[in-house]
């Protein structure tokens, strides 16, 4: 379980769930750190990292959610967004 009350993986301190996962699994990949900053800015809405990409990624994900009704399709397309972000880092 994650990103819910009393979940194993959720927000910790000022970190979003993605940042928590990266930290807990001791992942050191700079691309994951960059994605974590983007996800943080989108999820926490505090512009802590001021990532310019955050607004565009948020808009892409909102478009996917609006256009596609099933979770499976949303997950597949959303994963593609993050796969491409990873490759571009």
Image (cartoon, rainbow, N blue to C red):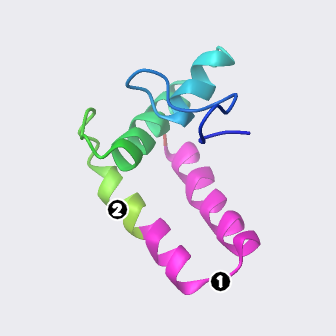
Q: Is residue 53 above or below residue 81?
A: above
Please count the marks in the image: 2
- Any magenta on residue 41? no
Residue depth check, mark 2 versus mark 1: number of the one nearer the observer: 1
Residue at the limit of the structure toward the front, as seen here: 5
| Main SS, magenta residues | helix
What residue would you read off at disc 1?
69
Looking at the image, which residue is at 37% across and 25% down?
14
Among the 4 quarters of the image, the one containing residue 22: top right
Q: In terms of depth relative to the viewer, which is nearer, 10 or 57? A: 10
Which residue was labeled with disc 2? 56
Residue 72: image x %, image y %? 76, 70
| Element class at badge 1 | loop
Tell me, yes or no, whether the highlighted magenta stretch contains residue 65: yes
Q: Kindly state the secondary structure of the residue where label 2 is placed.
A: helix
Identified at 54% across, 75% down, the residue is 64
Q: Earlier in the sequence, mark 2 or mark 1?
A: 2
Label placed on residue 47: none
Q: Which residues are magenta?
A: 60-88
For the residue pair 89 and 6, the one nearer the viewer reads as: 6
The quarter in which the N terminus is drawn is top right
From this view, report whether residue 15 is shown above or below residue 42: above
Q: Which residue is drawn at the image coordinates 69% and 64% (left, top)? A: 75
């Amino acid at each position: 379980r994650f990103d819910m009350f009393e979940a194993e993986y959720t927000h910790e301190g000022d970190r979003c769930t993605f940042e928590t996962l990266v930290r807990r699994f001791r992942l050191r990949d700079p691309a994951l750190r960059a994605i974590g900053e983007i996800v943080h800015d989108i999820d926490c809405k505090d512009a802590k990292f001021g990532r310019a990409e955050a607004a565009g990624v948020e808009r892409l994900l909102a478009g996917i959610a609006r256009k596609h009704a099933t979770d499976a399709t949303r997950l597949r397309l959303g994963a593609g967004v993050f796969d491409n972000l990873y490759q571009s880092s």
